[in-house]
């Protein structure tokens, strides 16, 4: 859940930088759970009440998470060294989303897994 909140709260419209696989897929998982839970509740409530207000809430949620979904997708593409425009290629973007990110800093930022320093040889810190 912390990954979902990190994307929605801290990086709502942040299209720069890199996102790890775990961040991307945990956001995807929780977003899918929330959407299916909303559809289930909407179905139960719609039968009993038939209120357009519930449908309005579902649309608000879907539009509310559209920007963070795109942002985390673009940052995921950046992690593998590709432009965010690769999200528009369906199968290839999925392959990139499951691929491990580049281990060193790339043109989009430092490696989110590393502590911030690249080690060239054992015990020596590489300076750029």
Image (cartoon, rainbow, N blue to C red):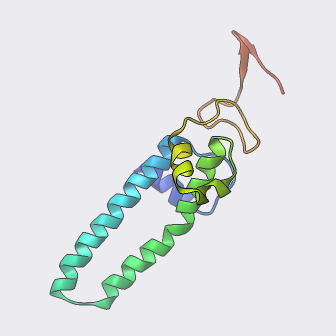
Horizontal relation, residue 12 to residue 1: left or right: right
Question: Quarter-wise, where is residue 103 in the image?
Answer: top right
Q: Residue at x 51, y 42 (%)?
A: 21
Quadrant in the rendering for residue 107: top right
Q: Residue at x 68, y 42 (%)?
A: 81
Task: Note whether 13 is above or below 102 in the view shown.
Answer: below
Residue 30 location (% of width, % of height): 38, 55
Residue 109 versus residue 74 in the image, above or below: above
Who is closer to the viewer here, 48 or 123? 48
Residue 116 vertical placement versus 84 (above, below): above
Which residue appears at 30% of the width and 65% of the height? 36
Residue that appears at 62% across and 30% down: 114
Q: Quadrant of residue 85?
A: bottom right
Q: Quadrant of the C terminus?
A: top right
Nearest to the observer: residue 46 or residue 125: 46
Residue 99 image position (x, y, % from top left): 54, 38
Q: Is residue 13 left or right of residue 62?
A: right
Give the side of residue 85 with respect to residue 23, left or right.
right
């Amino acid at each position: 859940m912390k990954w979902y909140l990190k994307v929605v709260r801290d990086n709502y419209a942040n299209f720069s930088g890199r996102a790890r696989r775990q961040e991307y897929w945990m956001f995807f998982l929780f977003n899918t759970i929330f959407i299916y839970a909303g559809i289930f509740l909407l179905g139960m409530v719609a039968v009993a009440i038939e209120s357009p207000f519930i449908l309005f809430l579902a649309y608000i949620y879907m539009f509310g998470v559209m920007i963070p979904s795109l942002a985390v997708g673009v940052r995921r593409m950046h992690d593998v060294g590709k432009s965010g425009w690769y999200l528009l290629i369906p199968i290839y973007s999925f392959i990139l989303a499951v691929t491990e990110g580049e281990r060193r800093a790339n043109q989009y930022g430092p490696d989110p897994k590393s502590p911030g320093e690249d080690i060239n040889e054992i015990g020596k810190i590489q300076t750029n």
